[in-house]
Image: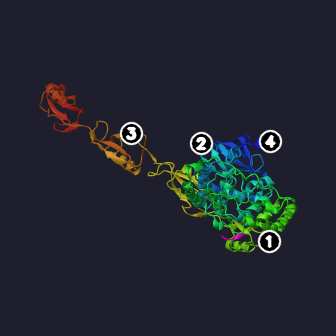
């Protein structure tokens, strides 16, 4: 959002330049001042993009009723997504300097407002006016489809982006500011009153047809370069909306086609039932009418009617001006154009008589204006200015409270809040309170119980333990005791259990304990080399490991049945992992050769060839050199490499 920058920027408007709002928006420069806010260009440091920040005036920021309504309306507007709508990004509050700023972060649209364009260029050609009007109505139609009423359609809220895209601003905000701005300076009021529908003036109500009425006045202004109703006091302008008829654009610009006269008349009918139901229906009519116009008609440059200057409307009511002077310009029908139908009771012939009849009403209104100052406009628009007392609605159901307020000609604005003792749906408080005297049709803020504040424990099992805290905080809960245990099936850092269980209803701030997986439990590998294979198998199996036995081997050093080797020999494994062991068959056994009766040399040769060591035991000096005995005896199985002792005689 943007607007033309005022030539004289006050020091108060510049005080925020350089400030960081809500820890996010760095104010870069002043853009514009408005009736309800000051607009700044800011940098969203979180998303690194330029935004327009609309900072509410201090008197509005101190009004709790306004702030509450403003926040609700801002949320509604933020849900409205359309290429011709200025997007609402964020709404916040900043109290870093103790001033309690209320602000709105919106799409920054560099360009000019439609007011700037009309001021600089005057009346537009029908083609140019309709080229702008189509996206304006498209934006308003999108809002109506979403159940949102603009309530403040005017050229100041239409922005022409530098690339030609048309944007409509301030959706949903007019409602929030209505009550808070009724006592603003008359200049501010004039800017809005010029586009108020009769029902808004008379009864303070608005619907989609009220936006259509304002859009018709914007079309009139684009075609003629001037407001349909103008004046230097709000009551003067409001009076014309209620009692006058919008003049035909062709009365001012003679080249305007009849189809456009009819479009303005259709949208600005005093009776809402005679207007299109919403902006979408009106857009259909606009497009049908445009299709009927020729290229020549669409592109004709505006030319003032000869009688225009002579028929100018006086700008204020005074003692020397008859009240009929506020009635719109009397129609002069050109020879080739049929008169545009007017509302019943609004013919030009009885304008003077009608003025004399309503003059006492005008006098009464002026007296009220003199007595009440700025509040007179609210008295006039809310009419008849009567007051009522707020009924006591505490402890009633919300439906019953709304009915009581309706009987007292009051509206209810409901805000819900949790309470441990008050049943859900019951009014806990009202502001203003019971017995307070207030204006009829004003709002009473009801705080209604939502019952005890409870939140369901979220399901944490299977989620990351690191995210558990944030998940719980989002549910207004906290992380309690955190245990850790090994788990052979769940990855480390994952929640495997929680207490209380998911879905349990808990008070805010309640703690939820979690058990977190440490992953698979490591198992230390013991060395069973040289020990019994059975002992090794039992120990490994009991630890959760799988034992695989390799081919047995002979060993001269490891007894049969004991572990010769294992893989791995040490370190750590996890449950189910495998340890391979090799079991000893004992040493290699060889048959001892038969050597008895053989000569010593031959016997020694045979034994050595079989892999044995040889020792001798000589009897009587071994005179005959013959083997008499062998130990072990021939044919006996003995360990290869063992010593065989020969007895020599």
Q: Position of residue 49 (x, y in %)?
A: 62, 42
Q: Nearer the viewer, mark 2 or mark 4?
A: 2
Q: CA distance from mark 2 to mark 1?
A: 52 Å
* Disc 2 + disc 4, Cβ < 8 Å: no
Q: Which residue is mark 4?
A: 11
**Comes first in the chain, label 4 or label 1:** 4
243 in relation to 67, above or below: below
Q: CA distance from mark 2 to mark 3?
A: 77 Å
Q: Nearer the viewer, mark 3 or mark 1?
A: 1
Q: Nearer the viewer, mark 2 or mark 3?
A: 2
Q: CA distance from mark 4 to mark 3?
A: 83 Å
620 in relation to 69, above or below: above
Tag shown at residue 163: 2
Judge whether residue 490 is colored magenta. no
Q: Nearer the viewer, residue 422 or 593?
A: 422
Q: Position of residue 108 (x, y in %)?
A: 64, 45
Tag shown at residue 569: 3
Q: CA distance from mark 2 to mark 4?
A: 32 Å
Q: Kindly indicate the quadrant of the structure image that contains residue 375.
A: bottom right
* Disc 4 + disc 3, Cβ < 8 Å: no
Q: Which residue is mark 1?
A: 388
**Comes first in the chain, label 2 or label 1:** 2
* Disc 3 + disc 1, Cβ < 8 Å: no
């Amino acid at each position: 959002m943007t607007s033309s920058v005022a030539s004289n920027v006050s020091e108060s408007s510049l005080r925020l330049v350089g400030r960081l709002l809500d820890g996010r928006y760095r104010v870069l420069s002043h853009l514009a001042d408005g009736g309800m806010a000051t607009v700044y260009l800011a940098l969203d440091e979180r998303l690194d993009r330029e935004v327009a920040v609309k900072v509410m005036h201090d008197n509005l920021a101190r009004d709790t009723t306004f702030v509450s309504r403003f926040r609700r309306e801002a949320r509604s507007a933020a849900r409205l997504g359309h290429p011709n709508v200025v997007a609402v990004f964020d709404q916040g509050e900043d109290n870093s300097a103790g001033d309690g700023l209320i602000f709105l972060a919106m799409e920054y649209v560099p360009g000019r407002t439609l007011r700037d364009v009309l001021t600089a260029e005057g009346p537009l050609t029908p083609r140019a006016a309709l080229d702008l009007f189509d996206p304006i109505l498209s934006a308003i139609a999108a809002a109506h489809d979403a159940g949102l009423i603009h309530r403040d359609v005017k050229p100041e809220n239409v922005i022409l982006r530098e690339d030609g895209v048309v944007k409509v601003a301030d959706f949903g905000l007019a409602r929030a500011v209505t009550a808070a701005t009724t006592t603003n300076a008359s200049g501010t009021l004039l800017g809005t009153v010029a586009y108020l529908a009769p029902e808004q003036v008379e009864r303070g109500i608005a619907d989609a047809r009220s936006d259509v009425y304002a859009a018709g006045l914007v079309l009139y202004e684009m075609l003629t370069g001037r407001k349909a109703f103008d004046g230097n006091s709000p009551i003067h302008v409001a009076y014309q909306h209620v009692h006058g008829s919008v003049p035909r654009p062709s009365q001012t610009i003679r080249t305007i086609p009849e189809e456009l006269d009819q479009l303005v008349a259709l949208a600005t009918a005093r009776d809402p039932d005679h207007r299109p139901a919403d902006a979408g229906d009106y857009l259909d009519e606009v497009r049908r009418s445009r299709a009927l116009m020729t290229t020549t008609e669409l592109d004709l440059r505006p030319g003032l009617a000869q009688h225009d200057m002579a028929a100018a409307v006086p700008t204020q009511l005074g003692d020397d001006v008859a009240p009929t002077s506020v009635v719109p310009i009397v129609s002069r029908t050109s020879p080739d154009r049929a008169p545009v139908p007017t509302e019943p009771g609004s013919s030009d012939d009885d304008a003077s008589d009608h003025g004399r009849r309503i003059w006492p009403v005008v006098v009464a209104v002026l007296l009220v204006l003199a007595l009440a100052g700025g509040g007179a406009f609210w008295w006039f628009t809310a009419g008849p200015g009567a007051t009522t007392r707020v009924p006591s609605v505490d402890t009633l159901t919300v439906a019953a409270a709304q009915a009581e307020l309706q009987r007292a000609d009051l509206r209810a604005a409901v805000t819900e809040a949790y309470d441990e003792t008050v049943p859900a749906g019951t009014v806990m408080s009202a502001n203003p309170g019971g017995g307070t005297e207030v204006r009829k049709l004003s709002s009473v803020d009801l705080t209604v119980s939502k019952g005890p504040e409870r939140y369901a424990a979220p399901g944490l099992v299977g989620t990351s333990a690191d995210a558990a805290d944030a998940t719980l905080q989002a549910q207004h809960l906290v992380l309690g005791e955190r245990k850790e245990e090994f788990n052979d099936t769940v990855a480390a850092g994952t929640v495997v259990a929680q207490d209380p269980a998911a879905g349990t209803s808990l008070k805010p701030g309640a703690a939820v304990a979690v058990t977190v997986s440490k992953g698979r439990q490591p198992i230390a590998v013991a060395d069973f080399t040289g020990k019994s294979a059975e002992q090794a198998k039992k120990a490994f199996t009991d630890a959760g490991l799988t034992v695989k036995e390799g081919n047995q081997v002979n060993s001269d050093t490891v007894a049969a049945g004991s572990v010769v080797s294992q893989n791995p020999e040490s370190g750590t494994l996890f449950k189910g992992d495998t340890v391979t062991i090799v079991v000893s068959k004992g040493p290699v056994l060889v048959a001892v050769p038969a050597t008895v009766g053989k000569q010593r040399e031959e016997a020694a040769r045979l034994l050595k060839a079989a892999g044995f060591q040889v020792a001798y035991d000589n009897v009587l000096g071994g005179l005959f050199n013959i083997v008499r005995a062998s130990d072990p005896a021939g044919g006996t199985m003995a360990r290869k490499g063992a010593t065989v002792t020969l007895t020599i005689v």
